[in-house]
């Protein structure tokens, strides 16, 4: 079981997520050291093992796999960090191995959502990269 902690603070990692329509690649610049990866479908959330915190997102997500949906931005989004509660060995970990997480796309807002788009009051919503929000509602297993 992978446990994540959210540390709310005013600092986030500045950078930009880009998407290449031709080949379906999602990328983050600048490139940072990420030696621990959480894979959700074919998207990597990179963690730096020296700080145990998430620092980038990249991977493959073709538009053909997206489900169109009107998405609602969580109301209580705060800036902060996603940290691993325990040290993991460098490498890749797949928390969605029980079932694939769906990808939702809101064309009006130009948003992508990986996983469950339904929100509840216990969710913790953190902007950990510039314009990248994670909604953490429970522990994930890998």
Image (cartoon, grey):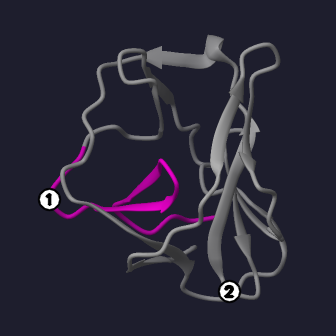
Quarter-wise, where is residue 106 in the image? top left
Residue 48 got which mark? none
Quadrant in the rendering for residue 64: top right
In magenta stretch: residue 131: yes
Q: Nearer the viewer, mark 2 or mark 1?
A: 2
Q: Nearer the viewer, residue 1 or 12?
A: 12
Q: Earlier in the sequence, mark 2 or mark 1?
A: 2
Give neighbour class at mark 1: few <14, some 14-19, many 20+ (Cα, 10 Å): few
Q: Looking at the picture, how far across and down is residue 21, in whole percent?
A: 72, 16
- SS of the residue at dot 2? loop
Residue 60 lies, in percent from the top left, at 75, 32
Q: Which mark is residue 121?
A: 1
**Quadrant the C terminus occupies:** bottom right
What secondary structure is found at the residue carrying circle 1? loop
Q: Where does the magenta region start and end?
A: 119-142
Judge whether residue 81 can be spotted in this image: yes
**Up/down of 72 relative to 119, above or below:** above
Q: Which residue is mark 2?
A: 51
Say which residue appears at 29% left-offset and 20% top-offset. 70
């Amino acid at each position: 079981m992978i446990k994540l902690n959210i540390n709310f603070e005013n600092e986030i990692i500045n950078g930009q997520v880009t998407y290449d329509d031709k080949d379906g690649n999602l990328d983050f610049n600048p490139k940072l050291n990420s030696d621990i990866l959480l894979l959700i479908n074919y998207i990597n959330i990179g963690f730096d093992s020296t700080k145990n915190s998430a620092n980038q997102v990249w991977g493959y997500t073709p538009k053909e796999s997206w489900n169109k949906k009107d998405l609602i931005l969580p109301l209580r989004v705060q800036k902060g960090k996603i940290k691993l509660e325990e040290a993991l060995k460098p490498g890749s970990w797949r928390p969605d191995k029980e079932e694939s997480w769906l990808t939702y796309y809101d064309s009006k807002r130009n948003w992508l959502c990986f996983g469950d788009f339904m929100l509840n009051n216990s969710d913790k919503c953190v902007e950990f990269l510039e314009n990248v929000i994670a909604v953490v509602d429970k522990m994930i297993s890998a």
